[in-house]
Amino acid sequence: MDNSHQGNFIYRFLKSIQFSGKWLFQRAEGACNTVFGEKNNPMYYLGALTFFSFYILFISGVYVYIFYNTEVSSAYASIEYLTHEQWYLGGVMRSLHRYASDAMIVTMVLHLLRRFFNDRYNGGRAFSWITGVPMLWMVLITGLLGYWLVWDQMAQFIAVRTFEWIDWLPIIAEPTARNFLSNAHMTDTLFRLLVVTHLGLPLILMAAMLIHINRLHHPKVNPPRPLAIGMLLALLALSIAKPALSHAPADLAVAPSVINFDWFYMAVYALMGSWSMGTVWAIVVGATAFAMLLPWLPPKKREPAAVVDLSTCSGCNLCVLDCPYEAIRLEPRSDGNTRFTQEARVIEDKCVSCGICTGSCPYSVPFRRTEKLVSAIEMPHFGIQKLRDDVITAMQQPGEQKIFVFGCSHGVGKHVTKLDKPGVVGVNVECSGMLPPSFVDYALRQGAAGVVVTGCREGDCYHRLGNQFTGERLNRERKPELSHKVAPERVRLFMGAEADKEELYGELENFHSSLAALDDGGDIRHEEDKGGSRV
Amino acid sequence: MNTLGRYIGQGVVYLIFIAFIGYFSTSPSYLHVPADMALIKFTFSHAGKRIKEFDDTRTKEEMAKLPPQLRTKKLSRERTSLEVEFEMDGQMLFQKKILPRGLSHDLPSPIYERFIVPAGEHHFRVRMNDDIHVEGFNYFGEKSVTLAPLQTMIVDFDDIRNEFVID
């Protein structure tokens, strides 16, 4: 969100919630980093774990369905058979089906909250947000239909209360809950309709999941294998330790009394018991509408999209490969240039102005002696000319041995321009992935003793893939690579969240000492200083 | 943290996760109807009588000027709102005027009300007026019922026999 909304009450309210939530999540993520490691941190794979729960649900659901009888008179008995007679497999599968559905709600809600707290739901990300919110309702409805199919007292409760709730709407002429007045009203046809809906909704959900990730390049749809195995084993252990059981069979002549609620799905039914149906409708519709409108409360000021300079663009495809939002594609040349056949074209609607394309462009080199330094693709508001000027200005600050920090604007790098540390200067870039590796070389040539590039915590890049790409470029595993003439011991990568400021100080202290030792030993900054050629 | 410590830490995280899911998937339980109470569903959908036969403001003279095939009167669609009262042991449980559904108020008036009452013997009386031209009520029902704990009793209106059914 930009600063123009600071006087807005909604803005300040949302910001205060975000601040508290972010603080909480960053501590939880830090704890998980300690025990799982950054590559397997479940907090960084909440969306992927939701997908994984869906896979478990699909497989366990298919197994349960093989034994399920779709007649209302025998549905309950078929589930009881699975639970008690075939407890060793059918019962486990039923329990797994239930607990995976609960896990799906937990990971979805955490995923949603995390996106909100980290301010990753508006601007160019609004599409994923507004396609994600209705999916929560689809999962809830599918799960409730699943409970319904057991046709026990909880199913009876859900069926009757759901239709009583729907009947509150003044558009219904005949109360639909009257379909559940007696056992004779409950027909096989109606029951089979529910079965078909329970099977059909996940197919729609699957399509919605694909749409949800449609605008992402390399979406994380599968958790790392250790995490997937861990989650599966945990749910299996729960299924064995506490098998899912049915209530007494449904009997519409008898009112259900005590119901062991699945609160992940049924919390709204508790509200129906305390408040009027109209109030519950207002809460549900109001909360959903609020969530859907959140990206525009207030609207995020979007920075201008990346622009392509056709005089230098060779259509090399690197920016297309690296764009995390699939906002760039290659098209036939439009400028009559016969040397190259293609050019990069930015899809403005998808561009979130992260600048990762600038970092990937081989023309983002500060050493060129042109009147105006322009990359083949860059941000109109923050091009490589500005970045080079910022580096020069920062290096002109007084002091002897300097560490130059390129900090991303979202993680710990937020602090780099305000670091109260002698001998450390820095500039901010939108994302660490925006930094062309040649600028590391440039800062060293401007006199820096060492360069630190900071990004968000590993696996948690604000722009999804920026810190991964930067790491690979600095390690010379991805184009454009850091020049081989740069001494690797003078370059460090530090990944951290805003909360990791102290760790950054420690890293700088440590780097300072090791650089001092290097310089005392007469070490060199560039291979060319030994007689090699300039980049 | 060493490898063993990390595995233990992961185990603790998974344990918290499944404990959270395991607990809230069945607990705390929810009390829908207390075991010593019964549930009454007072529900029916009944179309009130039309408020007037015709909905036509044209005078006889105006009608006479029309061609013979256009001299039919436009039927009125609006129905009477139902006035309903439901008593248990002389105590009024429900008393309401129910508007017909539909933009022209030409559809039935639906009622669906739930009452949780103590189990045991009760005397029920129900009255309804569905005709604006009739003073008081034109349908009555009365019955004594011994409600078993958790029994669901239905109070319905049979549109074919035009009478209340308390069962």
Image: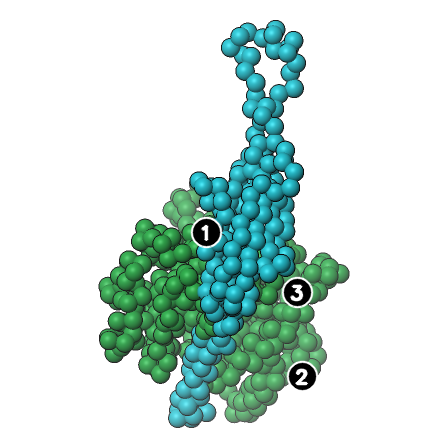
Chain colours: A green, B cyan
Q: Quadrant of the N terminus of chain A?
A: bottom right
Q: Position of residue B112 (x, y in %)?
A: 53, 52
Amino acid at the residue labelled 3: Leu
Label 3, label 2: how many angstroms apart (C-alpha)? 33 Å
Q: Is residue B61 above or below residue A301?
A: above
* Residue drawn where x is 24% and y is 75% of the image: A86
Place residue A472 in its image quadrant. bottom left
Query: SS of the residue at dot 1?
Result: helix
**What's the mark number on residue A178?**
1
Give the mark nearest the N terminus, 1 or 3. 3
Give the mark nearest the N terminus, 3 or 2. 3
Q: Nearer the viewer, residue A520 or A418?
A: A418
Mark 1: give few (<14), some (14-19) or many (20+) Cα within 10 Å: some
**What's the mark number on residue A421?**
2
* Residue drawn where x is 65% and y is 19% of the image: B57
Label 1, label 3: how many angstroms apart (C-alpha)? 43 Å
Do residues under tags 1 and 2 come within 8 Å of each other at their CB atoms?
A: no
Amino acid at the residue labelled 1: Arg
Q: Nearer the viewer, residue A156 or A432?
A: A156
Query: SS of the residue at dot 3?
Result: helix
Residue named by callout 3? A14
* Residue drawn where x is 61% and y is 42% of the image: B137
